[in-house]
Amino acid sequence: MNDTWTLNETAAWVLDVPGKVALIAVLAVVLRWLAHRFINRITGRAAKGPVPGVLAKSKAGVFLSDLASNGNERRRQRAETMGSLLRSIASGAIWSIAIVMMLGVCGLPIAPLLTGAGVLGVALGFGAQTLVKDFLSGIFMILEDQYGVGDAIDVGEASGIVEAVGLRVTRLRDVNGTVWYVRNGEILRVGNHSQEWARTVLDVTVAYDSDLDQVQQILREESQKLSTESTLAGVIIEEPEVWGVERFDKDGAVVRTVLKTAPLHQADVGRALRSRVLRRFDQAGIRIPSTTLPPTGGTA
């Protein structure tokens, strides 16, 4: 009889404690798999273009629609980054809840554990404020698509081409080849030279005795030829404009010409236009003032 009761109690305990723990673990694994599958599906569709109809009107749908409007490589990188972040958050949340439930099934006091975890979390939060700030800034930068790999950006003390965008650090390389590692939490403003379009602004200073009508006509003709007949015609996306006299400097009048270009091509267009304009000015006898430099080879 005692043996029967012992077997019954053992079976009851096995079904009551280890069985429940195993069931919670299995449910956590299944729920994690479903969450990852859902995240992979929506980020995969976002990387290819269309947004799932069930999310179209939600905040996630707005983000994914914006994601789909960018270039393929840029879109894929953002989708992968956000997918990795969402999967990590989902796994952490599911397993945290599952472990707390398992401890409760085993009869361990949960309240002190939660209280201690809360105190520890507050302490870590105060001690890692900079790290948390960097991660939050990185998440919002990716969500808002402020910049991506390959963009030319200016973040204040550093500027250059973005080589990597992480949740904590952005890596960019400047024109001299120096690699800069910038913490995302330190970036207060970003100037992006690579989004949608750029503009070449050419300010030419001519002597005050120059024929300004002739100057503007030459600028108009050369910028028009550059946009239609040169190898750069494909990157000039709108009709060039000569805005006229911009200001008066001590050396002469400044005449401005602007050309709307594809991103990252404004410097190439500017250099080509300067060469053309200088050659035409020489032919027309239009003088570009220059500051008198001191003689070289010694001091007076």
Image (cartoon, helix red, strand yellow):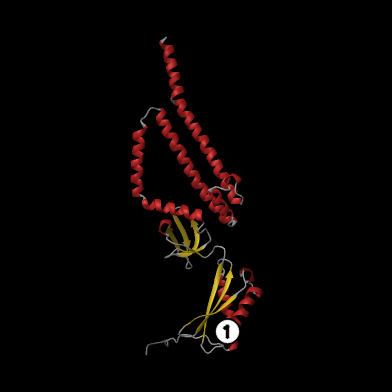
Picture quadrant of residue 122 = top left
Q: Is residue 99 left or right of residue 59?
A: left
Residue located at (43% from left, 21% from top): 13
Q: Secondary structure at mark 1?
A: helix
State the image coordinates of residue 124 (x, y, percent, origin top left). 35, 46
Picture quadrant of residue 134 = bottom left
| Image height of 162 relative to 135, above or below | below
Q: Nearer the viewer, residue 180 or 58?
A: 58
Image quarter hosting the N terminus: top left
Picture quadrant of residue 38 = top right
Task: Inspect this view and state whether residue 166 appears.
Answer: no
Q: Nearer the viewer, residue 142 or 255?
A: 255
State the image coordinates of residue 47 (x, y, percent, origin top left). 58, 51
Q: Is residue 65 left or right of residue 291?
A: right
Q: Residue furthest top?
A: 1
Name the residue type under label 1.
Val
Label 1 environment density (alpha carbons within 10 Å; few <14, some 14–19, many ≥20): some
State the image coordinates of residue 181 (x, y, percent, origin top left). 43, 59
Q: Is residue 266 left or right of residue 168?
A: right
Q: Nearer the viewer, residue 265 or 139?
A: 139
Residue located at (50% from left, 53% from top): 143
Q: Which residue is mark 1?
A: 215
Task: Inspect this view and state whether residue 242 appears.
Answer: yes
| Image height of 144 relative to 160, above or below | above
Q: Residue furthest right?
A: 229
State the image coordinates of residue 69 (x, y, percent, origin top left). 59, 56
Residue located at (42% from left, 15% from top): 6
Image quarter hosting the C terminus: bottom left
Residue located at (45% from left, 22% from top): 14
